[in-house]
Image (cartoon, coloured by chain):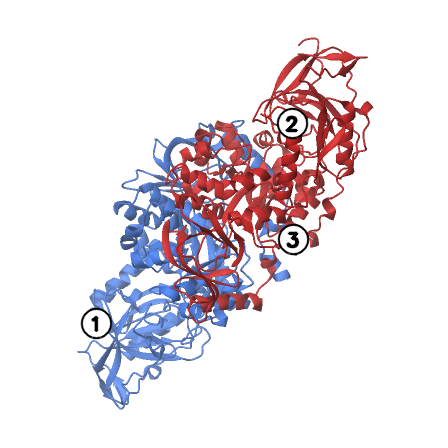
Chain colours: A red, B blue
Amino acid sequence: MIMDLMYINNNILKVGGGGMINDIRSRIDVAAGRKKAELVLKNCRIVNVFSSEIIEGDIAIEGGKIAGIGKYEGHREIDMNWKYAAPGFIDSHVHIESAMVSPVQFAMEVVPRGTTTVIADPHEIANVRGLDGIKYILDSSEAIPLNVFIMLPSCVPATAFENSGAELNAKELKELINHNRVLGLGEAMNYPGVINGEEGILEKLNLAKGKIIDGHGPMISGTDLNAYVAGGIRTEHECSSVEEMLDRLRLGMYILIRQGTAAQNLKDLIRGITKENVRRCLFCTDDKHPDDILMNGHIDNNIRLAIKGGIDPIAAIQMATINAADCYKLRNIGGIAPGYRADIVIIDNLKDFNIEEVFKNGELVGHDKKALFDTNNFVQDYSKVSNTVKAQKISPKDLKMPLKADVVNVIRVLPHSILTKKAVRKVDTENGNFKINKNLDILKMAVIERHKGLGNIGLGLIEGFELKNGAIALTIAHDSHNLIVIGDNDEYMVKAANEVIDIGGGIVICSGGEIKGTLKLPIGGLMSNESMADVNKILHKMLEVAYTELKMNKEIDPFMTLAFMALPVIPEIKLTDMGLFDVESFSFMEICLTEAE
Amino acid sequence: MIMDLMYINNNILKVGGGGMINDIRSRIDVAAGRKKAELVLKNCRIVNVFSSEIIEGDIAIEGGKIAGIGKYEGHREIDMNWKYAAPGFIDSHVHIESAMVSPVQFAMEVVPRGTTTVIADPHEIANVRGLDGIKYILDSSEAIPLNVFIMLPSCVPATAFENSGAELNAKELKELINHNRVLGLGEAMNYPGVINGEEGILEKLNLAKGKIIDGHGPMISGTDLNAYVAGGIRTEHECSSVEEMLDRLRLGMYILIRQGTAAQNLKDLIRGITKENVRRCLFCTDDKHPDDILMNGHIDNNIRLAIKGGIDPIAAIQMATINAADCYKLRNIGGIAPGYRADIVIIDNLKDFNIEEVFKNGELVGHDKKALFDTNNFVQDYSKVSNTVKAQKISPKDLKMPLKADVVNVIRVLPHSILTKKAVRKVDTENGNFKINKNLDILKMAVIERHKGLGNIGLGLIEGFELKNGAIALTIAHDSHNLIVIGDNDEYMVKAANEVIDIGGGIVICSGGEIKGTLKLPIGGLMSNESMADVNKILHKMLEVAYTELKMNKEIDPFMTLAFMALPVIPEIKLTDMGLFDVESFSFMEICLTEAE
């Protein structure tokens, strides 16, 4: 009971609170014109998401909230010269870890681009450190100029065919379900489990009763889809077609239109939007990588693309603001009106849609896409999520791959995709073990369990990378985030893997036995403590090494692709720390062909 | 702390709950087609409020909730023959007491007409019995086939110029604010208090932080309106013009389009609806009298009139369903989709809009506007809200009205209105006291304090009733609900008033000294324990007496009009238990003209 109470919404048991009443009074005084506001943004073209109009006027701000709209005077006044003022944008579904930086460093890049609220599903760090991982995201985002809400990861571990760092059942999740920034249960990826009524996932769905439950159920339809929704699942970000979108809209799901780095569904899905159903559509990014955020933007990019694609600008802005607030029942967020948080984005015009300034709780926090806040001002304690690589260092014998025959199953990587195909190839062997043939594009890959030092090493073969004379190792490997390493030489692979172990997690690229690039990701082995720009610089250099020194296939981003080679829910064939996995039959398989094949 | 916990949402501290998990599993099993549903409504034209379409299909129901939409089999199947199936309607703002019956009797008439959820503001009974009054509404509606949510009355007492039965400050309201059927704070009628930042109302606004706060702020605009909204007020049902409506929509308020008995704003306000803003518009009745409900309907009437007025039928239904659910953050109510409560209305067509059948939690509860449930099955304990008339019986000397002069201020009643005008008249006096002149239409009126037996009697004169040879007394007198009595003879007035006191509250009509009609309203002196139809019959008979025996002005409904003669917030001149009241100057006034006048 006491444990629950610690995380119960502070507001429930509080009343009176003189400070809060004074805040209300102060705001009312300003709104009524009895006193000057702390700040007035004058001469705005306000994007009114309630009435779908552009309203000209001043925005008076007091105590971090909007006090009044109209004609106001302030102690500070900023003339907006009739630029457009919209509510701060909401990313309705995002994995902050995919940006490879801490929450405050993430904020440093997305906030000046207009995103003032995110609804994050921290299942990456939860797979590494369980509840401590989630608490790290919550605690390290408490005071930053970005509203971070959390959906409790529902699928940790993702499957029974890999070892992750934690197991979060309903019993564990109960501790956080009533935190005031936890909105519900994260994407229920185990949709077969929901549809089949499995006890474990049902316990989690029940825990989230009365809150929101996110979905991840692509391609299902008919009675399966009804069953999925009947479990209480109310949002879907995995639609790739208008047909999927309409099926789900009709069953009461909100559609989260995704523009991520790998997954870009916006162009297709906006064709399914109508004046009548747009209120049930939101925007999200899901997974967006540093380079993509820095070059293209964040939710502002979703809006910009939608407008280019013919969506009414105000409707596009509603999708990024009030619609998400409605879906997730966020209060005082998502609109420009008295009482709402003063999270305001200033935009040049509704065609080019360049973000010029961003206010958060009435403070100017971004100008021309540069953060005006200092990340050093925010205490960052990641001690509970560091030193997360517990694997013992390896030696070449750990990578020995005994083969009974020389015709083998190989993972064939597809360009610009996280899907793989099964390929059957003939390989060289020596003393009954796999032997690399430098003329063949078949590399060894290993997935090394790294959370508990179990010693598991899953081995497989992979083609498509065209990597020569080197190795790459990293601890980003969805969803269990074990240590994945690829190479054409066992010694190089050992060097790369052991360096990753030494630095406590990250990405390492080896060329000819020499470490040529290192990205430290000390936070869970997933996130850097540095800025997104610095991380991006290092990644670019490492990509340079991959393409020019290791002569890699330029159609493939090695880090992004490797990060999905251990994900046993995406077809067709993957590798976990427990071995080679056939996604179609959802079971392990041999490297060598069996007699029957 | 313990007191708060008693009313904390049960769900917060519960997890697991095998029964609830089995419910989810059962529903999923049905949705997936693995087992037959308890009930299937076959061949429906489903009004889809999410996608704004009519979708043909079956509705599978299990455990009181909708399990699936499509093609389903059930243990029971009802062929709807392609009639329209809509979600149960939501009255977003209503005073149940105005229907003059208990919650279950109210349900008996509104549920078969399609209303399955109401959001009630019980300020009438709260003015009589405070928290006990609110608890009565909550407890007596716990198990009935109508979802009753409550907004805690924010203005008890309404003003300082009358004595009501209770005083509900933030301190008192705190006990109920976290009840799982309390959604927030009721209509903030004291809008001057809000706009001026008065401590008392601000404490209540603060108590409701994070919940919804209803508004009641007609006619205010500009900085006043901004100040009102800045206090956290998010809904408005008192709009009478499109201009008011748009002003408020733009500041983020939801507009509750009202079709009540006295106040009928629908015809005007629907002209302000657009495709873009309709999502922020809801329907309500506010105050609807028995005859009006029985003859015209309830929220079905709002929808019917809107359709007649040119509003798209699906949009009109959305206003009565999903829009209200969004505004009040109701979960699993307001749509037809898996997981939603099986509250379903069957309608003949979207033009005539006759309600044929109503299902509540999957049970058939209404057919052809007749309830199929027995009110006797619901335990009705109104012991805490009975015996609420504590006034001592009166005698003619209590009604003596000393007059210094014979030119006096008189309350002039206007037909079809609750507004009054000040009139100045010359009257007869005898021995320095008012004397009735049977040729003049000037009657005596008294407001007798009846909650605590204080002995207060406010006296005044009133014209417009044209009542002859009789008296009318009742304990419905907004908002304090003291005992109001009118007549052309002190003895008759005493007879009527004392009969009301004897029966524990109600309406009594006297003709020539003889009691000719009695409506007992033992619940708080406001509500009958009988059916709405029986109450209506008695009211009709009493109206008959009023018009034919007492020769009353037929342009005036005596009971409705008298019920507003003690309301000191509606202009121009009113009477409370503390005396004659000038609403314009918001202060008491003399019956006799002062020297200066």
Single out the residue that lies furthest toward the top: A595
Q: What amino acid type is highlighted by mark number 3?
A: Tyr
Q: How many marks?
A: 3
Q: Chain of mark 1?
A: B
* Outermost residue to the front: A548
Dot 3: element: helix
Which chain does the residue under circle 2 lie in?
A
Q: Amino acid at mark 2?
A: Thr
- The residue carrying mark 1 is B466
**Number of other residues with Cα within 10 Å of mark 3, as a class: few under 14, some 14 to 19, many 20 or more:** some
Instruction: Tell me the quarter of the image containing the C terminus of chain A.
Output: top right
* Residue under the image location 75 percent in, 35 percent down: A500
Q: Are discs 3 and 2 both within one chain?
A: yes
Residue at which label 3 appears:
A7
Please determine if labels 1 and 2 lie on a single subunit.
no
Which element is circle 2 on? Answer: helix
User: What's the distance in space between the residues labelled 3 and 2, CA to CA?
Assistant: 52 Å
Q: Position of residue B215 (x, y in %)?
A: 41, 61
Q: Position of residue A224 (x, y in %)?
A: 52, 28
